[in-house]
Structure formats: C-alpha cells, structure tokens
Image: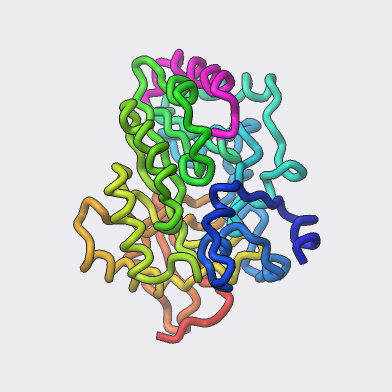
Amino acid sequence: MTRRVGARYAIAITPAMADLIDRSDPNDPIAGQFVPDARELDTHPAESADPIGDHLKSPAPGIVHRYADRVLLKIASVCPVYCRFCFRREMVGPQLGEALSAAELDAALDYIRATPAIWEVILTGGDPFVLSPRRIADVTTALGQIPHVKILRWHTRVPVVDPDRVTDDLVSALKASDKTVFIGLHTNNARELTTEAQTAIAKLVDAGIPLVSQTVLLKGVNDTADALEALMRALVEARVKPYYLHHGDLAPGTAHFRTTIAEGQALVDELRRRLSGLAMLTYVLDIPGAFGKVPIQAAKISQDGGRISVSDPNGGTHVYEDACAAPYVP
C-alpha cells in the first residue's frame, strides 16, 4: 500500500514526528497526518489537483496573485514532512515539485517590483525553511529592496516538525531592514508542540519575529473541541497567536480527513464558549476555483445538507459541495 501511495504522492516524516507516534494507538493523530493510507488512492468527484486555483492566479512561475495587496511566492518545492491532506500534494515533492530556476525567481521578483499594489509577500512552497539560510537571506535581501513591499510572511512547518533547523543563522536570514516579518506556523495537534518545538518558537519570538498559527480541521486528528482547545491554549502559551482554522480543501484522496462544514461550525461555537479571544481563530474556507478565502462561521447549509452557498470577497456567490467521506447527520 505504501508503495502504491508513494508512487503517486511524496512521503517523508522527520525523526521528531516519528518519535511522537504512539504505535499502540491505531488512531494516533500524529501518524494520521504523515503515515500513508490506502484511502489516499480514492478520489472524490468533487476533488481537484488544484483545489484552490493556484494555477488560475499565477501570472509568473512561483507567483500566485489572488488578492490585490498580497502575493504568494513559492520558493521551495519540497518539505521536511509531507502531510497526507496537503492541498498542494500534486505540486510538491521530489518527483512532482518544480523548483524555481534562478531565471524564474528573478522573473517572480520582477513581477513583485512592477506591481506597486503588493504590500505583503507570503513565502511558501513546499516549505521555504528547507532552504539554506544563505538562500533565504538572498530572497529576504531582494524583497527588502522593494519599497512598496512592507510585510514578509513565511509559511512553514519546520519549527514544529524539524526544530533543529531553527538556528541563529536562519533567524538572521529572515530579518529585513524596514520590513515587518511574520511567520505562519502550521500545526494541527497539541502533541506537536514538544519541548524542542517550543524552544525553536521561542528563538524566533525572542528575535522579534511574531508568529501566527494555521491549522487544518482534520477528522481523527483534531476534530473535537478538547483537541482544538488544547492546541489553541498551547499555542498562546508558546507566544503564537491562533489565526486560521482551515476547512479541509478538496485535494485528491483526502475525503477521509474532511469533516462537514456543519461539524466545523459547531466546534468553533464550542471553542468560543471555552476560550478567551486571545486564543480564538477564524474558521475559513478557500472557495474552489480561485475565488478566495472566506470566514464560514455563519455560512448557511441548504436543505439537503450537502450544498452550501458562500460569498467570495468580491460579492460573488458560489455553491460548495460539502464532500467528506461520510454524510453528517445533525
């Protein structure tokens, strides 16, 4: 089974995450995120290789320009771990990923230089923290010389899944004069915030780099109020501000991870009863077709329970199919 899944999607897990797996628990939430599953070979009709429309909003290699004031700059095509639910699973990994050439990176930077509306650059991939501090510093320096870019936000799993990579050299490479630097930390279960992860996070925060979190709502990993509450409290205690709870994207072979939106809404309502505002996050859906990310606490579910009407940031209305492995019965 692993060979069949590996022939289609990248597989990797770091020692830090492998050591956390409870091999006596068939439903271990760490294993669930990283260990291949035969269900990944089953594709739901609603799923897509590009579920949020990156390609539709890519004016240059490595660039995704979905919102007027910010762009994604995908500077890496590999990751230290490969999440089994990844929405870019058809675009990352040693076989599927396409690293930017030097010429393509120059062209991407030229696009940013030529687009004065861009206020924020979100550096992603893959995971950009797999790059050497020297290469990260080169990108930081280039972006630091663009006057209209004010915010650099790095999206990464590394401080949690491979904390030894967070070195003094890496921290120095992230700093840009006259720019504000943020890190978006992807973590899904409180057990990931080990002592080593907390040390890596502290190194970044103590250097003056604020962190916000991104979490994906995942069946069997964090789809209980207790699990999400524990994660949000652990993040705040580590000086990471909870930011987004993502509804699972319609990536191929991920239906077994997705809850329904109704289940997600109920969980967020319960978190609001339990947590201080400091520990609350925003539950969001990336509307398929590159229509953008929208909060869905208040989204309305139609009578059949599986078709949801959502409005995009520009006021357009779209029907979203609530595609998960099993129907939700309220």
Q: Is residue 38 left or right of residue 30?
A: right
The residue located at (36%, 21%) in the rendering is 179
Toward which corner of the image does residue 205 lie, by quadrant?
top left
Res. 272 visible in picture: yes
Residue 52 image offset from top left, x and y in percent: 56, 52
- The correct choice, above or below, for 82 with respect to 111 in the image is below
Residue 64 image offset from top left, x and y in percent: 56, 38
Q: Nearer the viewer, residue 120 or 40?
A: 40
Res. 114 visible in picture: no
The quadrant in which the C terminus is found is: bottom left
Toward which corner of the image does residue 254 lie, by quadrant?
bottom right
* Outermost residue toward the bottom in this view: 329
Residue 3 image offset from top left, x and y in percent: 80, 60
Q: Is residue 164 left or right of residue 278?
A: right
Question: Does 130 lie within the magenta span?
Answer: yes
- The correct choice, above or below, for 76 with respect to 227 in the image is above
The residue located at (27%, 48%) in the rendering is 237
Residue 207 image offset from top left, x and y in percent: 34, 26
- The correct choice, above or below, for 160 with respect to 51 in the image is above
Q: Nearer the viewer, residue 305 or 181?
A: 181
The residue located at (52%, 46%) in the rendering is 161
Taken as a whole, is the magenta stretch helix, strand or loop?
Answer: helix
The residue located at (49%, 57%) in the rendering is 287
Q: Nearer the viewer, residue 313 or 123?
A: 123
Range of residues picked out in magenta: 128-150
Q: Is residue 197 left or right of residue 104?
A: left
Q: Nearer the viewer, residue 105 or 172?
A: 172
